[in-house]
Image (cartoon, rainbow, N blue to C red):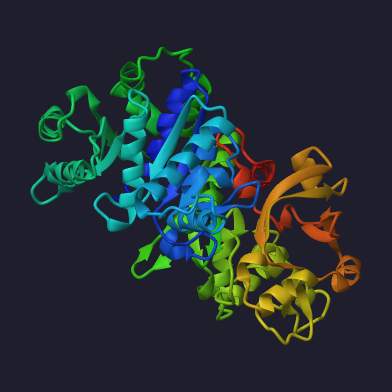
């Protein structure tokens, strides 16, 4: 089922196998027609994760990178749109020798070829493959068909894990197995018998429930694995190991562990669980309100980066969601609440909604010396706030918010303007890893401990260089630039405990065992 935890389960199984000494890679398959995740609403779909090579993909790829401490690429991400596009292009190039090209087997064969390419390219012992969506949906049938064909082609080398949900109805007080039985039957209809069932529930599965699933889903009792809710997703590998999942996988594949070492991961869990002083961080965003619910997946990498950095500073994170719109009225009492927080983050985003509220938040943080970290749009709004209130350019804005702006202190690069006019939005982003030179004696240089870095980007608007000299003359520090294009990458303010904004997305490179240096420094200062 969608959102039941397949991504975390995939990453966790990969971590277990990595701990046994095997080289692991991962692939996310999304069944939608979109070629990538770049144009999708983050409230509906969650965060768009960006790889070093600029691929805009599903947030689960971020989970794989964080758990496995590897950098993935465009080859590790697949969608229906991407697969069909490739097959049609091959047909146009006469690569099928003039024969009739059919949905089956040609689409599944393309899927299999892409999986095998990742195995070769990443020199992987194991490739973890997550098929998105919900079992029984029409749109992922072709991927299940590819999976069935793979097992037929590679007997003894392919295993299936089905992640199912076991609801506990409070008023009855009983955990129900029928949804899991139905899921397994729907998977059987696609020609696949699961080797494992991972039972997601609020609490661990008991023996009667495991036995029921074993009998009705045609599994050995030992292959029904408990997957209860946990305080931190990083605990999941150890939960799986309580039921012996690693040993069961290797036994089925007739393999032996090369080693058995998750010491660093175990140490991380001990750090997470240990009682520590709290750091209270406010994230001012606009992509987490959906009806009566708060959906934080839109900012999942930011959340995880904050956690990694607080644990590294021997602190406990307390993250609060602050709606940007509520600050738009200019209500001073609303703004005064910001003093309750040890630090404020203004993350990325697109469009005008909530931007004036974020600008007021940034101004308050600047004036009241509240540690502030701006990410992507956060940098652009910090430049607008500084331009309006320090440089005296009252109508300073971004070309994104006003196409006819007189003072666009944030603007498109020249080569992007023609593409935007043609509505070719897919070609107007600065995506993936870009180099940045850091100015010495800045907070950034102190955090990174180097003067040359590479960070991942996802935006189409830049600081307008026509205003750069004025901004600097009024006290803005340009702490980092991309020398190749002469683009502003990092800004800071002197005389402030921590006022740093970056044009890139540092959260995308943070890992639990290797926290991002900028977040680490931010939390260090906020914690004081």
Please state, as top left, top right, bottom left or bottom right, where the C terminus lies in the image: top right
Camera-side residue of 224 and 447: 224
- The residue at 18%/28% (across/down) is 219
Using the rendered view, name the quadrant where residue 246 is placed.
top left
**x and y, in percent, of residue 475 in the image:** 86, 64
Counting labels gives 0
- The residue at 85%/69% (across/down) is 465
- The residue at 37%/25% (across/down) is 157
**x and y, in percent, of residue 352 in the image:** 59, 77
Camera-side residue of 211 and 271: 211
**x and y, in percent, of residue 117 in the image:** 53, 37
Kindly tell me whether residue 183 is visible in this rendering: yes
Q: In this view, does 402 lie to the left or right of 300?
A: right
Camera-side residue of 147 and 505: 147
Q: Residue furthest front?
A: 98
Q: In this view, does 424 lie to the left or right of 124?
A: right
Kindly tell me whether residue 280 is visible in this rendering: no
Using the rendered view, name the quadrant where residue 382 is placed.
bottom right
**x and y, in percent, of residue 130 in the image:** 40, 42
- Looking at the picture, does residue 374 appear above or below residue 1? below
Q: In this view, does 246 lie to the left or right of 301?
A: left
């Amino acid at each position: 089922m969608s959102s039941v935890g397949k991504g975390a389960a995939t990453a966790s199984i990969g971590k277990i196998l990595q701990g046994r000494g095997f080289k692991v890679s991962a692939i996310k398959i999304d069944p939608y027609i979109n070629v990538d995740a770049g144009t999708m609403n983050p409230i509906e779909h969650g965060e768009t994760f960006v790889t070093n090579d600029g691929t805009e993909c599903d947030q689960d790829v971020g989970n794989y990178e964080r758990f496995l401490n590897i950098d993935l690429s465009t080859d590790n991400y697949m969608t229906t749109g991407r697969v069909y596009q490739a097959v049609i292009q091959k047909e146009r190039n006469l690569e099928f020798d003039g024969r009739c090209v059919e949905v089956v087997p040609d689409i599944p064969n393309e899927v299999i070829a892409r999986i095998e390419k990742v195995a070769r390219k990443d020199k992987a012992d194991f490739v973890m493959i997550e098929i998105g969506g919900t079992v029984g949906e029409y749109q992922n049938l072709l991927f299940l068909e590819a999976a069935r064909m793979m097992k037929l082609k590679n007997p003894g080398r392919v295993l299936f894990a089905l992640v199912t949900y076991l609801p506990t109805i409070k008023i009855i007080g009983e955990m129900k197995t029928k949804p899991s039985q139905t899921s397994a039957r729907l998977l059987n209809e696609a020609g696949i018998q699961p080797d494992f069932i991972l039972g997601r529930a609020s609490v661990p599965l008991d023996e009667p429930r495991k036995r029921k699933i074993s009998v009705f889903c045609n599994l050995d009792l030992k292959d029904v694995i408990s997957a209860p809710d946990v305080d931190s997703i990083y605990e999941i590998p150890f939960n799986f190991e309580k039921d012996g999942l690693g040993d069961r996988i290797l036994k089925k594949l007739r393999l032996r562990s090369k080693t058995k070492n998750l010491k660093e991961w175990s140490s991380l869990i001990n750090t997470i669980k240990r009682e520590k002083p709290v750091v209270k961080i406010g994230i001012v965003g606009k992509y987490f309100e959906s009806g009566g619910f708060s959906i934080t997946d839109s900012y999942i990498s930011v959340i995880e980066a904050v956690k990694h950095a607080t644990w590294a500073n021997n602190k406990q994170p307390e993250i609060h969601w602050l709606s940007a719109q509520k600050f738009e009225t200019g209500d001073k009492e609303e703004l005064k609440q910001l003093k309750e927080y040890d630090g404020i983050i203004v993350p990325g985003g697109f469009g005008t909604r909530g931007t004036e509220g974020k600008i007021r938040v940034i101004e308050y943080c600047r004036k009241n010396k509240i540690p502030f970290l701006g990410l992507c749009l956060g940098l652009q709004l910090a430049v607008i706030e500084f331009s309006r209130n320090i440089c005296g350019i009252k109508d300073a804005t971004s070309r994104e918010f006003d196409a006819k702006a007189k003072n666009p202190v944030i603007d498109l690069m020249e080569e992007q303007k023609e593409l935007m006019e043609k509505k070719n939005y897919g070609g107007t982003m600065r995506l993936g890893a870009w180099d940045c030179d850091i100015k010495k004696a800045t907070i950034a240089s102190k955090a990174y401990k180097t003067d040359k870095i590479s960070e991942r980007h996802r935006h189409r608007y830049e600081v307008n260089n026509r205003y750069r000299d004025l901004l600097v003359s009024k006290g803005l520090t340009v702490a980092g630039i991309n020398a190749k294009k002469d683009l502003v990458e990092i800004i800071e303010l002197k005389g402030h405990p921590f006022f740093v904004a970056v044009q890139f997305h540092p959260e995308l490179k943070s890992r639990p065992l290797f926290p991002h240096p900028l977040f680490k420094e931010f939390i260090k200062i906020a914690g004081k």
